[in-house]
Image (cartoon, rainbow, N blue to C red):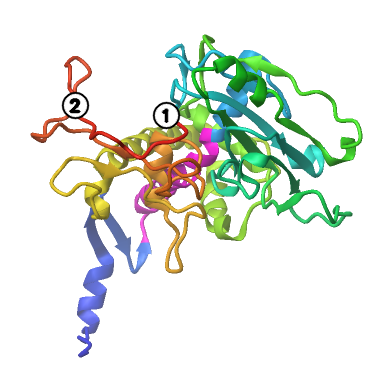
Amino acid sequence: MKVQTRTPDARKAKTQTTDTRIGKLSFENGYPTDETARKVFEEMDYQRAVQAFLWAYPAVSFEAIRVALKQDLGIDYNDFGIADNFVDPRSVWLTANDTTIYALANVDLGKSGPVVVEIPPGAIVGILDDFWQRSIADVGLPGPDGAKGGKFLLLPPGYKGDVPQTGYHVLQATSNNYNAMVRGIVVNGDKDAAVQNVKRVKVYPLSESSNPKPNKFISISGKVIDTTPPTGMAFWELLSAFINNNPVQARDLFYMGMLKPLGIEKGKEFKPDPRQRAILDEAARMGDAMGRVMLFEGPERFRQPLPFPGAKWHWVFQVNPVQQTDAYGQIDERLRYTYGAIYTTPALGVMKAGPGGNYVQAFKDKDGNRLDGGKSYRLHVPANAPAEAF
């Protein structure tokens, strides 16, 4: 490849002024003017805040669930919120269905030490995710014990203590905060049996394994609660709380460096000044717009194979459970999924009736018109679809 050389005059001309999307930037003798320096730093902080919003979205989503359960319903760590009469529109969740019995509990390994999640036998499908929504294990039907149940032991990051040699599926955690979610499958229309089986799920510190305290199961059915991520400054407040309660992982260190000039730093209280607040507030609104565009238009950007060629459907699961490939981290795929849904697991995306599950979605009708909540539509499903659990 031939490299084009530049004359001294061309280099000098390039450094004097340049037109950009934030206006003209001026340099005198190579140095930025005061106004240029101010504008560039403002733009740098804004761009970094927007990208940090996209990066942080899955963690803030789970932190929003934790805070909503605690503040609105008094559900603390190691206790369960249970949809014992299904989920209805009074509770705002991302992609909850109304045909299974949900129960979920948050754990904090930094406070509790190693934690046991005990799954009873029976028709239960469950997920253990960290707050980045990365799966550490499937439990219940898709898990290693299937419908036989089992005990799963979450070890805190850097744990050096004794570990039981038998009786547990031992899982080395990389974060302190985890979310355990199970779904009780309603068999032969017997909702009460599904509820009772879900209530046999246990979460307790390993230190209390000889006599674990009974878990509280607090109903979330019919309750007015919004678990979705906020925008504006509330988003950054939740992010700061999450960061201060979890170890920073190597792959996230650059993002932490981007957040530092914006007032978000591990081990420090979040107290943004007026300049930082203005940047963060605008960045959250832009980031939210990007998430919405990614959800609805992302499939066109990714150009992945369609489930039904010629139709308007797209696969929901375009991010893998560890959220990275050998070549790159799936930040766009992760954002698209977690902006519209919650929880990832290896079982989601598996074409196997029973323990597996897969999802498709469409935002347009067969003619390419966007779906409108004020209109009625007819959905045609082929006979004998391969479904087993629900």
Q: Which residue is mark 2?
A: 371
Q: Is residue 179 above or below residue 192?
A: below
Q: Secondary structure at mark 2?
A: loop
Label whose residue precedes the other's in the sequence (1 or 2): 1
Q: Quadrant of the C terminus?
A: top left
Q: Give 84 or 338, whichever is nearer the viewer.
A: 84
Q: Which residue is mark 1?
A: 95
Q: Is residue 26 above or below residue 7?
A: above
Q: Give 294 or 270, whichever is nearer the viewer.
A: 294
Rendering quarter of residue 268 = top right
Provide residue 281's location: percent of width, then percent of height.
43, 32
Rendering quarter of residue 211 = top right
Give amino acid for label 2.
Leu
Provide residue 90's location: percent of width, then percent of height.
46, 11
* Identity of the residue drawn at 42% across and 14% down: 89
Q: Which residues are magenta?
A: 32-61
How much space separates mark 1 and mark 2, taking CA atoms? 17 Å
Q: Secondary structure at mark 1?
A: loop
**Dot 2: few (<14), some (14–19), or many (≥20) neighbours within 10 Å?**
few
Provide residue 86's location: percent of width, then percent of height.
51, 16
